[in-house]
Amino acid sequence: MLHHITLHLARCAEYPEGSARHGYEMTAPLDDKGLLDAAEWKATRSKCRVRRFWAGQPDRFGVLVHRPGGSGGATWLIDYDPARTTDDEAGYRLNKHHFLPGEYVSIQDEDEKLHTFQVMSVRSVKQAASAETR
């Protein structure tokens, strides 16, 4: 099932309290344990969108991509421009991380700097759509 997921930058040296002004909003398929679902991604890839928000920078929009290879046999990444690979942001073992509120995931930016994010919210696309119509 597709879910809307919000990630905020976790505590780090630059932001000791974390930051709600740095993160991602994404639509991604999750199984009943909160793991990314590669089979569902294949069927819904056109709906798996990502918005990166970073204080002081314009928002970036991309797609969630699943590629063979990497840790555990697969790599999940964010692709901002299909014509270039230098702008991709790879997730660190995202195939093993649970996208549940309070959990943590790591994403490597295009400069190869690894950032840790806390999962702030996870709502099914159906839940999110019904909340918007209220």
Image (spheres, helix red, strand yellow):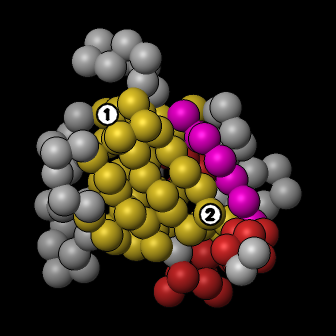
* 102 vs 46: above or below: above
Q: Main secondary structure of the magenta part?
A: strand
Percent x, y of residue 103: 65, 33
Q: Is residue 120 left or right of residue 9?
A: right
Q: In the image, what residue occupies the spot 50% across and 86% down? A: 46
Location of the C terminus by quadrant is bottom right
Q: In the image, what residue occupies the spot 51% across and 62% down? A: 26
Q: In the image, what residue occupies the spot 40% across and 73% down? A: 63
* 48 vs 95: above or below: below
10 Å crowding of disc 1: few (<14), some (14-19), many (20+): some
* 14 vs 82: above or below: above
Percent x, y of residue 85: 19, 66
The residue labelled by disc 2 is 4
From where the camera sits, is residue 28 visible? yes
Helix, strand or loop at mark 1 = strand
Q: Is residue 22 left or right of residue 97?
A: left
Q: Amino acid at mark 1?
A: Leu
Frontmost of labels 2 and 1 is 2
Real-space Cα separation, disc 2 to disc 1, in angstroms: 23 Å
The residue labelled by disc 1 is 114
- The label on residue 15 is none
| Nearer to the camera, 130 or 60 | 130
- Does residue 47 show up magenta in the picture? no
Q: Which residues are magenta?
A: 118-124
Location of the N terminus by quadrant is bottom right
Residue 97, image quadrant: top right
